[in-house]
Amino acid sequence: MRTALVKSKAILLIEIIIVLGIMSGTKAICDQIQIIPSGVTGSIGIWTGILVATFFYKKRKITWYDVGLRLPKGRKKWLNQIGIGLLAIGSILLITFITLYVLEPLFGLEKAADATDKFNFFLGKPVVLILYIVIGIWFGAGLGEELMMRGFLLNHLKKLLGDSKISWALALIIQAVIFGYMHSYHGSRGMVITGLIALSFGIFYLVSKRKLFPVIFAHAAFDTLTMVGFYLSESGA
């Protein structure tokens, strides 16, 4: 029994390492090729990882529906989940405020000087911006990152850590650290902000009884507003 449990946990850990490794490796290869805009390579990496995660889920007879990929049914559920999504957006604003005005001066956090350079490819090109919002933000960041980080990684970590009361808490923290590290190109300030957002989104995912729609909506909506604001400020539109 104990041997079987150890083997099961080892397989879970290996699956996590393989998925994250393929995801980051694919992004690194795309970045080296330099044909695809760097603002899109992350989405390619994410979806490559999701394909592998889907394979592992099928082996376990698990579907994405089982981990929360489903639309609300009925007006009440739509309003409830959109409301949770709006609260999640509010948490992003609060986290950003606390990081900028409390954590940054306290710990000397720094922003990478070229953090936004990867998005210069759509400046002055409204059609490219719209395409990036649809493909890169809603499909890539919103849907893709939430499937990967909350749908796969968070749930896999929970299974790996067992059934103790602190398993979810540890899983939340680990996936937040990983997500923050994935955004290291933003500098230490960006890593802290994105890590705390991942922690917040993980909590909202659990509060909504493991439904992905609220965090997908919040993630995509906030990133859309951010990119539109960046476009308007930098393009002089």
Image (tube, rainbow, N blue to C red):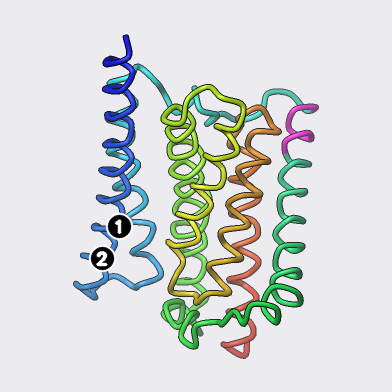
Q: Does 8 appear above or below 83?
A: above
Residue at left offset 32%, top offset 9%: 1
- Residue 7 position, x and y percent, is 26, 22
Residue at left offset 45%, top offset 62%: 181
- Residue 64 position, x and y percent, is 45, 28
* 8 vs 76, nearest the viewer: 8
**Quadrant location of residue 19?**
top left
Q: Does 177 appear above or below 31?
A: above
* 119 vs 165, nearest the viewer: 165
- Residue 133 position, x and y percent, is 52, 62
Q: Is residue 169 magenta?
A: no
SS assignment for the magenta stretch, majority: helix
User: What residue does disc 2 label?
Assistant: 28
> Label 2 amino acid?
Ala
Question: Element under label 2?
Answer: helix
**Quadrant location of residue 169?**
top right
User: What residue does disc 1 label?
Assistant: 24
Farthest bottom residue in view: 236
Q: Are marks 2 and 1 in contact (CB under 8 Å)?
A: yes
Instruction: Tell me which segment is drawn in magenta.
Output: 76-81
Residue 116 left/right relative to 107: left
